[in-house]
Every structure is written in structure tokens, then in C-alpha cells.
Amino acid sequence: MNGNHTLNSRASAREPSGQVCFEHDLDARLCFRRGALILNGTLLTHADPENGSAADADASWDLSADMTATASAYTGIGEIELRDSRSLLGRWHYTIGLHPEACAFVKTINQRALRHGGPSGSESEPAQESAPETSLDTPDEITSKTTMKSLGRLAGFCRPWTRFFLLSFVLSAACTGAGMIPPYITMPLIDKVLIPFQNGHPVDEGRVVLYLSALCGAAFLVWLLGWARTYVLAWVSERVSAGLRNALYTHMHRLSLDYFSEKRTGDLIARVSTDSERICFFLSVYVLDLAADILMIVMTAAILFYINPLLAAVTLLPFPFIFWLTHRVRETLRRGFSKGSRAWADMTSVLADAIPGVRVVKAFAQERRETERFSEANRLVLRANDRINRVWSFFGPLVTLLTDLGVLIIWAFAVWMIFRGRITVGVLTAFVAYISKFYGRLEAMIRMVSAFQRTAASVKRIFDVIDIEPRIIEAAEPVVPGRITGTIEFRNVGFSYGTREVLKDVSLTIAPGEMIGFVGPSGSGKTTLVNLVCRFYDVCAGAVMIDGIDVRELSLAAYRKNIGIVLQEPFLFYGTIAENIAYGRPEASREEIIDAARAACAHDFIIRLPDGYDTLVGERGQLLSGGERQRISIARAILINPAILILDEATSSVDVETEKEIQQAVENLVQGRTTLAVAHRLSTLKRADRIVVLEEGSITGVGRHAELLSTSATYARFHQTNAEMYLAAGLPAGESRSEIAGDTERKYAQ
């Protein structure tokens, strides 16, 4: 690769030499910059042609069997990651239009990595390009390698509980050993007691009691050990599953907002709940049975060969064929369960959409439509499961047939040996008992294949989330701020959502305690600016400075404790009013909660409720009106006493009369704080020290109200629209359109 290499807009076709090229168009900061990944044989190289030179040696990798590449799609952008068994080797970004080529390129990387340096000419043609996929996993991509890797990582969560797993294994071994006793005792019981007695010979009654006592004691011992092993493994599997859920949920909270904006809630819930529960069930039931079955098969085979090697060899003839058949059906089941998991997650997502939005569904009389949506999702689940059942319904009975043939072989060959005096009837009886156990456990093991593959799919779905790297990464040695003063500076800030540029070279300095209002058309970048201050996203160019420090250098948790946010659509959690007000400070006393509610002008309506501050707000606060929810969210912000306050269209979702009730709460909230107010209504900006006008991602005006009326056509239109809205609302006498404008002009004329 050299500086004269010409990049195409798409991934190139396979060349005769085996070289494949993929061009990406975003750099690590998600700014437009061209680069190329070149795969030549098993050598992967990253080059930066805009610098006119090839990448250095640190940007080259010789593929090996433990390396895996993945392509993930997000809102507007995608990324390719290269990992080995220990760490992340590289990450490259591209716009979403290149995702099909990225998927094809990644498949080629993985094919060559699996071949571990095999000749490129022997490779199959690249897989068909896939459509952009927003889900975290593609079922057809789940292979034996990824399955074992995922299950190997699951072992890491089991490691803290190793001694309990060992204890359960010892108990399983003991239980299995105890289960081997009864068939062995039946041989002398038949040959030395029953047959002699049937032929008229006297028997030793003491020996009869001994044999029967041994059978009874073995049965009791099997029950006791079985209970102990089941309890121990169930106990430890619950803790492994809980640890996995905690790790997954904790990691999800580390991910940035753009991740959640593109994922369906139901799919994420299914991963945390259904998939983790499936893993718990597998560990508590099937792992235990698997260990017991393996021990049973090994012990049974050993005993059979000890009793009569020839009969044992004939008895086990169907075993290799059953093993081969199981291996063949495993891949089909793996793909089927992966697709089934996705179909189930999609159905859960329909529920997660429709149930919280049931008011909208009923308001628009769309019950039938939502029912059809669910029916379609349910049909896809049914279709995915039908595919599995078609395979399993044939495979299961076939295994039963083969095991029955194994027992028939025993009878036929054993009878022949008895006729020739080579074995006794007691040996035959013991063989039948042992082989029934053997094939019974073998059949149970084979039936575990479905549970194993279903669990492997669930494990991969969970680790697919855990493997997502947060886009907002804390500095290696972050600055831990105490109480900040609230100085905010935007230095030549640029930001893009994928290919859509939202902010262009924005520069603005905000002094401590200053209130700044942001106005402008929808999509002009107002909310994006405040999101950058909160560091929900990172800038693509420039920097956001807080008290002279780049926000990317600050400790996220410590910094965000200085920020209070009041959103356009206030979100309340299911719980009491007091719990929602104290969400940012759970340790707050009831007196502090009440003081915050008074400052937010919420105390009066709260005490009129039947249970006062202990009133349940319902799902997402639906038992309260919009204005009441907004005042509770203001009280929530007041309680944490933030240094920086974000008002993101805090009054745009309420009517004009309710807005007047909220204004006093806002007045109390902004006192002594640096405030950034995004607004569509001038009333929210009554106290603003400056108003910033944004258009198409750039600042087109900064000043006071009177100044902007004459210098900014956008602001003049904004003011005109607000005056007409208030007039149309039928405000009380004395608050006409002209008086609103005059009052605002007098306030900002100084």
C-alpha cells in the first residue's frame, strides 16, 4: 500500500491476488476523513491516503485463528472492530451507506482468520452483501467458534463460584456411582438366589436380606445425594445469572444516548430478563444433568466391559452413529434458536411499544392495528419455532429408535451367548439394566442439544451488548471537579449525527450565573448544544470548556452532579412523588424534599392528593397532569442544587395557563445558576441575560431582546409567532399582544 493508492467509494471486488479493500469515510472522532482497510492474504493493513503515506507497522495485523472482526450499525454510522482473545486491536468508522460493504469485508476477514493463513485462492467467494442491520447480532453469523467463545466467557462469571460447582460435581459423581449399585446387585440376586430357588435348591435368607437391604440403601443414597447436588447447583446458578444481569445492566448505563436511540426497548429487556433466565435454567438443570450423564455413560461402559467385553462391544454399536447424527443436527438447531431469539425479542418490542402508548392507541382507534402487529410478530416466533420443531421432531424419535435397536441387539446376542453357556441370565439382566440406563442418559444428553444451542444463542446476545464500547469514554486520569463555578465556553464546536452536520464552528462564552436563551427553527442545533454541555455526546471538532477545562477531561459522574435538567417531556419513575423528587439525592430528608417542592410551586397540589408526598405517580407519571409532572421535575432539579441548569423547552408541552403557574417555579430555579434555556416561547426567556439565535447549526445572532428584534429576522419572526399565540390563548385583560411585546422590550432595552 502506498500513497498513490486510489480509493473507491465502495469496497473493491476480490482481486486475483486475494487482495480486498474497504474504504471508510469517518475518523475516530466521527469527522469526515478517508481511510482504507486492505486485506492481502492474511495481512490486514490500515492506510491513511489523505496523509499520502501508508500506515506504520502498528496499523498492520497478521490474522490468526483467535481474531474476530465485527461490523455494527448505529444511527447514521457504522463501525468495524478487530479483536483477539485479549483486547480490542482496532476500530474504524464509516457512514451507514457503506454498511453492506463493511459486512462483506468483515466476513472475508473472519474467513481468512479461521483458515489462519491458508492460501487465498482456496477461499470461497465472499458472502452476499447484507442489508444494514441495526440489531446487535445476525443469527446466521453465529458459528461453532462464536458459540464456544461466548460459553467460554460465561465461564468467567462462574469462576468466583468454582468451589460450589466442584461440590456439585462431586455430589453428581457420588450420586451416579450410587446409581450403579442396584444393577450390579441384581446379578447375584438372580444367579445365586432366584434361579437356584426356582430349581428347588435351598437359599440363604440372610443373603436375600443383604441384597434387598443394599438395593434399599442405594435408592435412599441416590435420593439424598440427588437432592444435595440439585440444591447446590440451583443456588450457585442463580448467583451466576444475577451477576450476569448486573454486569449487563451496569454496562448498558455506561453506553451513550445514541445507542439507546436506535435499539428497541423490548429487545434490551429480553436480553436482561429472558436470556439471562435461560442461562440460569441451563446452569441449574442441564449442566447438572450433563455432568451426571457423562459420568453415567463412562461408568456404565466401564462396568459392561468389565462384566463381558464382547457383549459390551456389540451393545455399544449404535453409539458412534448417534454421536455423528447429533453433530450434524447441531448446526441447524444453532441457527434456528438464534433466529427464534430475535423473533421473540421483536415480539417483546411490540409489547414495549404498545403498552406504554396505550392511550395513543385508543385515542386513534388503532387497537386492531396493534393487535395485527402483535399477531405478525407472534407469527414470526411461531415460524422460527416451527423450523426447529421440524428438525427436532424427526431427530428425537430417530434417536429413540436407535437406542431401542441397541437394546434389541443385547437381547439377540445375549440369548445366543446364554444358549452356548457363555453368560448367565443374571449377566443378561444386569446388561439390560445397565444399557437401559446408558441409552436413557445418552438420549437425555442428545435432547440437551436443543437447550445447549438455545443457551449459546442467549449467551451471545448478552455478550453482544457487553462488547459494545461506550462512545463517551472517561479520561484515563479524569479531573474530579467539586462545585464548579459554571463558566461554559464553546470553542469552534462542530458536531454531526453520522453524515448530517448539525453544528458548524460554534463559539460562545457563558459567564457563571448567566442565563442564556437559545432560539431558532427546529433542527438548528439548540438541543445538541446542551447535550454537548451535559456530555451526552462528544464534539466532532473544537471543544466544550467548563471552568477552563475540556469537558472530556472531567470525571463524568462528578461533573454531572453539577448539572440539573428539566426536559420538555418530564419523565417520572414508577413510585411516590417524594421518591421522584429525591431521585438525584436519595438520601434527602423529607423536609428538604418539601422545601424543593415549595420552591417548584408543587407543594400546594401535592398536599391536596390523598396520600400527599406518598402518592404513587403511576407508570411514567401518567396519574398526574402535564403541568404537575413538570413541577415535580423542577423540584427534582432544585433539590440537587446544580451549578449548571438546562431547561430544554420546559414549558412548550403545557398550555399557556399552566405555563404561567410554572414560570414562578422556573424563576426560583434559575437563581444563582448558569442556565441554558432552549425555548419556543418567549415567556421562558423573561430573565435571560442574552439570547442566542441559531440557524442551520450556526449562531446568527446574540444579544438582548430589543437588539435582536431589529438585527435578526429569525428572532423577529419568533417573537411575532409567540405574541400571536398568547393573543389566541385569550389571556386576561391587560395582557394583549402589544403589552407582552412592550413588557419584554422594556426589560431588555437597558
Image (spheres, rainbow, N blue to C red):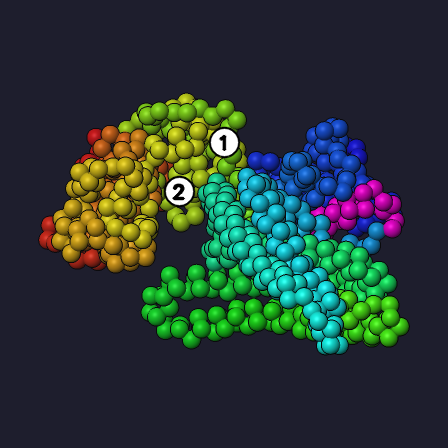
Residue 638 lies in the magenta-colored region: no
In the picture, the quarter occupied by the N terminus is top right
**Which residues fall within the magenta stretch?**
97-122
Q: Are marks 1 and 2 in contact (CB under 8 Å)?
A: no
- Asked if residue 735 shows in the view, the reply is no
Residue 57: quadrant of the picture: top right
* Closer to the camera in the image, 168 or 643: 168
| Distance Cα–Cα, label 1 vs label 2 | 25 Å
Amino acid type at circle 2 is: Lys
Secondary structure at badge 2 equals helix
**Image position, residue 358 (x, y; %):** 36, 66
**Residue identifier under label 2:** 526
Q: Which mark is residue 474?
A: 1
Amino acid type at circle 1 is: Glu
Give the mark nearer the N terminus: 1 vs 2: 1
Neighbour class for label 2 at 10 Å: few (<14), some, many (≥20)? many
Please tell me which residue is depicted at 42% across the width and 45% down the height of the picture: 524
